[in-house]
Structures are given as C-alpha cells and as structure tokens.
Image (cartoon, rainbow, N blue to C red):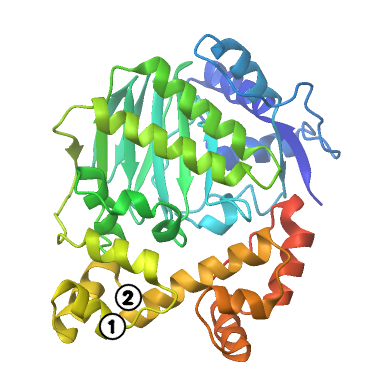
Amino acid sequence: MPYYTTFGILQSELRSYYREHGAGLQFPEVIHAMYVQGKLSEKPIQRMRPFQLVSNDGNAQFEALVDEISFSITPGVSTSLSECVYEGSVIPAMRDVFVIRHPRYTRPYLHRHDYVEVDCVVEGRCRLHFEDEVQELEAGTLCFIAPDSNHDIEITGESTVYCFMLRRSTFETTFFSLLSREDALALFFRTILQGDREPNYLIFQSDRLLEVRMMAQNAMLECYKSDSYSNSCCISYVNLLFAAFLRTADTSPRYYHYQMSSNFYLVLQYIRYHYRDLTLAQLAEEFHYSKPHLCTLIKQNTGVSFTNLLKQIRMTRAAEYLLRTELPVGKIAEIVGYHSADHFSRTFRSAFDCAPQEYRRRHAEDAERFIPFEMK
C-alpha cells in the first residue's frame, strides 16, 4: 500500500531531527521514522497552486510551490538504504530527466547510480563526498557525477541544490547534441558512454546565478507536469542550463578522473541523422575510413558495435512514435528503417521484452503512476 507526503513535510522532519540530535538522517531513514510515527498520509495530497514558469524574482514563491509537491512511498521498498540506486527506481517512466530539490539536513551515505547525476547549487553551499575526498561546492556550481561513482551531497543549512537525474539508457539520443561538440562536457559524457567505469566528476562554476536558478527551477517544474510536451521541455531547459555554464564558466573545470576521448563527434552526428538506411560501407566511404578501423572507432566511442548502435537509435525512435503517436506498427517500422514489420516486431521484443502494441498499452496504463518500463 502506498503512502504519501510532501517535500515540505519531509524537509520539516529532517530539519527538526537535525536540530534535536545534531546529526542528519538519510531519506529512507526519515521516511521510515515518519511511517512508524504515523506521519504519512494514506491518501494523495493535492497541491494548492498550479505549476507555472518562474522568473528571476520568484524564488520564494517557487520554494513554497516545491514544498507542496507530494510523492508516494511504499514502506519496505522506499525505506531501505542501498549502496546502488537504479534509474528505474527513481526516474519516472516516460521521463529522460527528473529533477528534485535535494533534501537538506541529511547525513552523508556514499552510494552510486547507474544514471548520470547533475547537482546545481543555486543558493548557499553544500559538501560533495566523493570516493575518498570531501570538498565544498558554492552557489553557482554545476557538478556532473558519472555512473558507478561513490558519492553523496550533504547540506547542513538552508542552502538550495537541485539534483538532476539523467537516464544513461537514453542519453545518446536524448542529449545527442551534447556529444557532437568538442568541449569538456561533451568529452566527459562520451567517456561515460564508452563504458568507462572509473569514478569521475566534472565541476563548472558560473557567476550568472539568477539565470542558472531560473532554468533549473523551470526544468524541475516540467517534471511535475503530465502533458505530452513536459519531457521535451525539461530536456530543453537542461540543455539551456548546460549551455549557460559552458558560455560563462571557468575555462578550467575541476575533475576527479578524466580522459579525453577520440575526435569522433562528426561520425556520431552523421549516424544520428542517417540511421534509417545507413550501412557501414556508406559510413566508411563518407569519412574515408576502412570498415575494420571504423568498427573499432565506433566501439571505442560508443561502447557498442555499429549494428547495435543503429538498433538502439531505431528502437528509441520507435518507442517515441509508439508513445507519442497513434501510427500503426507497420508504419512506425517503415519510418525507423525496417522493411519488414515482422522483423521490426522481433527486434523490438528483444529490446523491450514485449511486443510494440503491448509496450504502447502498458505505457498508456502506467504513465500516470510513473511505473518504470524501459529498454533492456
């Protein structure tokens, strides 16, 4: 049976415990305490005000709005500490990005994710616990944390940090434009997608706090809307946020462990736009590579073979068409590059563990409850 609370109530409990005991609790611990004390609601909590775009002078109003946002918890599932958190358990279905205001007054607990975490400090400061080091992050900091990195964010005051969770499983298509540049951020992400499992972070600093805060807040608001545009709008705000830092940030970002990847963005861009009928021979001819060398480059830069890369892109596009349109399966198969609807259906089933129509039906039923269902 699910229970409910709001960010404001949760934050009040964390603050009270910290002031009484001089130490914080982790999110699952405070939820468990609230459950035992009967402080969780058995019914969904309705918010009082509609979500709307925020401006640079609306910070107090936005904070009050966030406090009203409710979420559900399942005792025994949501109340257990784990050293590894998976994207399917925290990022709602049909979302490529999910944003929360990081809880304040928590105690550090090193854990790792299979998704990319981005922490945006918009007010005050926080501590980044990363592997065997601790450092202060000040307002105007954007911190990218690679998957499989032991870390935590600790906030012991009324500072404000927005936590962005980016699906690794859809990153290549969702944020493809980020991968096609030759800046530090693009190289950081390409290193992750190559399968590098080394602990890694990348930190930028900017002095354009009002602009940064507004984009982070609007990205978060989009996460709590349910229309068909909200996911795309959230992605757009995230891209704007990243661009703001890349435009104005210190040209020497800080990093923990960082290796430059190959200059491969033009090839990736070409694949992205010609995936429907592209062959390895055509790609090799276009970029004047031998086919064996091109296969090696693709594997090094994406972590998968050319064939699997095309399949991933096609399947991601097919899933989008299934969810966003009413086109028949045969037409979708044709659009994403399959001449046989049967072949397309078999490939889709192997990727998502269900037939295309079943995928469409499950999402139609589960979208409002945010039950994860994603490609293997």
Q: Is residue 323 left or right of residue 216?
A: right
Residue at the location (66% across, 54% down)? 77
When the figure is inspected, residue 40 is found, relative to residue 270, above or below; the finding is above
Image disc number at residue 304: 2
| CB under 8 Å between discs 1 and 2 | no
Type of amino acid under label 1: Leu
Q: Position of residue 12 (x, y in %)?
A: 64, 20
The image quadrant of residue 245 is top left
Counting from the top left corner in percent of width and height, residue 361 is at 76, 68
The answer to whether residue 376 is visible is no
Compared to 371, does 10 lie above or below?
above
Q: Is residue 156 left or right of residue 184?
A: right
Q: Which of 60 and 176 is in front in this view?
A: 176
Q: Confirm whether residue 217 shows in the render.
A: yes
Residue at the image point whose x is 72% and y is 55% from the top = 367
Residue tagged by mark 1? 280
On the image, the x and y values in percent for residue 95 come to 58, 51
Q: Answer with left or right where residue 267 lies relative to residue 75.
A: left
**Residue 68 picture quarter:** top right
Residue 147's mark? none
Going by the image, does 165 lie left or right of 67? Answer: left
Q: Earlier in the sequence, mark 1 or mark 2?
A: 1
Q: Nearer the viewer, mark 1 or mark 2?
A: 1
Element at label 1: helix
Q: What residue type is labelled 2?
A: Val
Q: Which class describes the residues within 10 Å of circle 1: few (<14), some (14-19), or many (20+)? A: some
Q: In which quarter of the image is residue 267?
A: bottom left
Q: How many marks?
A: 2
Of residues 362 and 292, the one nearer the viewer is 292
Q: In whole angstroms, how far apart are the C-alphas of marks 1 and 2?
A: 14 Å
